[in-house]
Image (cartoon, grey):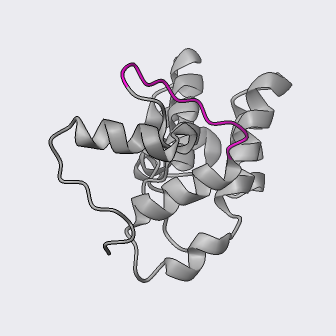
């Protein structure tokens, strides 16, 4: 499995595993012995630097005694999503890893929330509103016909 960059999903999984371990009063060394992993390997997972397969995450959750589906299922879903390939993977050689991670999160989004205190969000702007907003900003305005 390729090494993971610090993707948001892996960071979320790692942070949750760290919290679960600490809630049980275990050090990384003790947890490493329980999981048959070295402390540096566990640290890498908890810091979001290593991808986890679903079966490995399931094993860790089982060893930590996590049975609540409301805790398990979101973590397992994050692990599954992290391994999916989408349109953004065709750009792996040209984009930074955090950009690819952002694109994958955006593709998984089911809603977008935006709050604008002073402006109407771009997709909701009419041409006249956009022109007025830009002309009031002091930025030179060129018509799309001038381009």
Range of residues picked out in magenta: 109-118
Residue depicted at x 74% and y 35%:
74
Q: Residue at x 49, y 68 (%)?
A: 3
Residue positioned most to the left? 138
Whether residue 36 sits left or right of residue 111 in the image: it is left
Q: Main SS type for the magenta part?
A: loop
* Residue located at (48% from left, 24% from top): 115
Quadrant occupied by the C terminus: bottom left
Residue 1 placement, left or right of 15: right
Q: Which residue is found at the position 51% from the left and 57% from the top?
A: 101
Taking depth in this image into account, of 38 and 118 the one nearest to the observer is 118
Q: x and y percent of residue 5 in the render?
A: 43, 61
The residue nearer to you, when weighing 100 against 42, is 100
Measured as percent of width and height from the top left, residue 141 is found at: 25, 54
Q: Is residue 107 visible?
A: yes
Q: Where in the figure is residue 15, as x and y percent of width and height?
A: 50, 33
The number of callouts visible is: 0
Judge by depth and name the residue closer to the eye, 121 or 128.
128
Q: Specify the quadrant that holds the N terminus.
A: bottom right
Q: Is residue 88 found inside the magenta-colored segment of the image?
A: no
List x then y, in percent, for residue 117. 39, 19
Is 86 placed above or below 92 here?
A: above
Would residue 56 be seen by someone viewing this image from the given angle?
no
């Amino acid at each position: 499995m390729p090494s993971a960059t610090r993707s948001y999903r892996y960071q979320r999984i790692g942070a949750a595993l760290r919290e679960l371990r600490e809630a049980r009063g275990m050090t990384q060394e003790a947890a490493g012995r329980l999981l048959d992993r070295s402390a540096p390997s566990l640290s890498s997972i908890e810091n979001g630097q290593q991808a986890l397969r679903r079966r490995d995450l399931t094993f860790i959750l089982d060893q930590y005694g996590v049975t609540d589906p409301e805790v398990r299922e979101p973590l397992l879903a994050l692990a599954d999503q992290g391994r999916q390939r989408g349109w953004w993977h065709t750009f792996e050689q040209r984009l930074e890893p955090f950009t690819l991670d952002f694109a994958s999160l955006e593709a998984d989004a089911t809603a977008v929330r935006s709050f604008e205190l002073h402006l109407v969000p771009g997709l909701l702007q009419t041409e006249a509103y956009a022109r007025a907003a830009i002309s009031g900003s002091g930025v030179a305005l060129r018509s799309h016909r001038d381009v």
